[in-house]
Image (tube, helix red, strand yellow):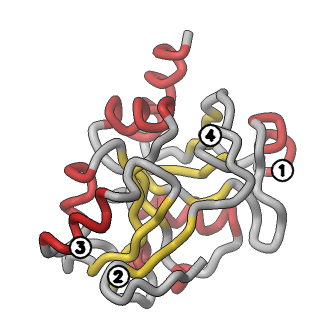
Amino acid sequence: MATLNIKKAVLTLNEGGVIAYPTEAVFGLGCDPWNEVAVHKILNIKHRPWQKGLILIAADFNQLQAFIQPVSPDILAQLETTWPGPTTWLLPVSSAVPTSLHGEHNTIAVRVTAHKQTAELCRAFGGAIVSTSANSAGKKPARTSHHVRWHLADVDYILSGQCSGSNQPSSIRNAQTGEIIR
């Protein structure tokens, strides 16, 4: 059953749809990051200004490389100490990345997930996906598929599953300065 659900989620992503799926702490909203119509749909669902940018989540570092500039061995070593896991890193963004993903920033927020089902989703999709909390701006993020259904009617597909149990959203750190943003 899980494989069938992931196939449906991947089909929705490939068709330009928005999905909700469990992560380490909360349900996320995701789409194909290269599909600007889908990215704008997420921004509209959340009532989120494009200037803030979005997080990308992946099964492994290779799935993120098209979105970032090459990183030094020192930064790569720093990333490897926290991945897979609930740490999101701000890395210099590739010039090929649409502004809707990184907003007004010269960095992009990326994470290699430790959530097994979400990593499987990224592998089945063949790349990174957008990962922003499943909520409207200013509201509490959804922690269950039922909460997503009740509060976010415009989501095209909800991948059922359990969040990993973390009480806090992922931390966000700047890889170049070490600054903890969240």
Q: Earlier in the sequence, mark 3 or mark 4?
A: 4
In the rendered view, would you say 9 is above or below 151? above
Amino acid type at circle 1 is His
* Residue displayed at 45% across by 47% down: 113
Amino acid type at circle 2 is Thr
Percent position (x, y) of residue 156?
61, 40
Q: Is residue 26 left or right of residue 112?
A: right
Mark 1, mark 2: which one is toward the viewer?
Answer: 2
Label annotation for residue 161: none
Circle 1 sits on which residue?
151
In the rendered view, would you say 49 is above or below 81? below
Label annotation for residue 75: 3
Disc 2 secondary structure class: strand
Q: Earlier in the sequence, mark 1 or mark 3?
A: 3
Circle 2 sits on which residue?
107
Percent position (x, y) of residue 26?
69, 49
Label annotation for residue 22: 4
| Marks 1,4: beta carbons within 8 A | no
Mark 1, mark 4: which one is toward the viewer?
Answer: 4
